[in-house]
Amino acid sequence: MIEAREVWFSYANEQALRGMSLAVGRGVTVVVGPNGAGKTTLLKVMAGLYRPDSGSVLIDGEDLWACPPRRRLELRRRVVYVHEKPVLLRGTVLYNVSYGLLVRGVDARDAAERAREVANLFGLAELLDRDSRSLSAGQAQLIAIARAVAVRPKYLLLDEPLASLDRTNRRVVLGFLEELRRSGTGVAIATHDRLLALEVADRAVVVEGGRVVAEGAPEALL
């Protein structure tokens, strides 16, 4: 389980999180709220990308920021965060999908095999030799999600994962989220898309002004 406990976080001139607490375990949790509510910031704090001003982040019971640096890296690698705007590397699609495995020390041949396996799941096999700079926004979004899935994360945090996808690719991602839910992977999604919450979430969390204001069954809240 990942837990944010009484987390406060501010940017230079803005208090983004105000004592926010959230736990993400098995299944799919969808975090819903208006622009500026703190959804994305919360996921970045839980992924260890941002250090909270106060409060704590626990990954499987260990306080992330109280750990030595090497242990902190080990814990962070259990969690993968996917940005709303895909961040792709120069090079081929195959290299991009393999990248997370390569930085974890996986042999290049094994990493490529796993990347091809995941690409097939997402219908990307024909794109593997393409340069990442030649892709559409929707293709780039799928590749970013595939890269995250390739490392078999224990926890997957997604920011607006369907934002750039057409109807066909939306169905692909929804189907894969359902598989992750059945497998017991912990998934948290930040979104404005209430339909997404109703389709895939086990739990919905509503945030406003940097605070959790409600949580429960999606059909009850949304």
Image: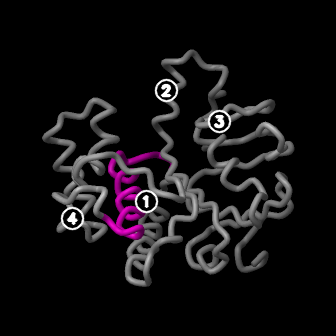
The residue singled out by tag 1 in the image is: 183
Mark-to-mark CA distance, 4 and 3: 33 Å
Mark-to-mark CA distance, 4 and 2: 31 Å
Name the mark on residue 50: 3
What amino acid is found at the position of numbered circle 4 in the picture?
A: Leu
Q: Quadrant of the N terminus?
A: top right
Provide the secondary structure element on which disc 4 rests. helix
- In front: label 4 or label 1: 4
- Which comes before the other along the chain, label 4 or label 3? 3
What amino acid is found at the position of numbered circle 2 in the picture?
A: Leu
Q: How many marks?
A: 4
Magenta residues, start to end: 135-155
Circle 3 packing at 10 Å, graded few (<14), some (14-19), many (20+), is few
What amino acid is found at the position of numbered circle 1 in the picture?
A: Ser
- Left or right position of 155 against 30: left
Mark-to-mark CA distance, 4 and 1: 27 Å
Residue 9 seen in this snapshot: no
Circle 4 packing at 10 Å, graded few (<14), some (14-19), many (20+), is some
The residue singled out by tag 2 in the image is: 73
Q: Please report contact status of discs 3 and 2: CB closer than 8 Å, yes or no.
A: no
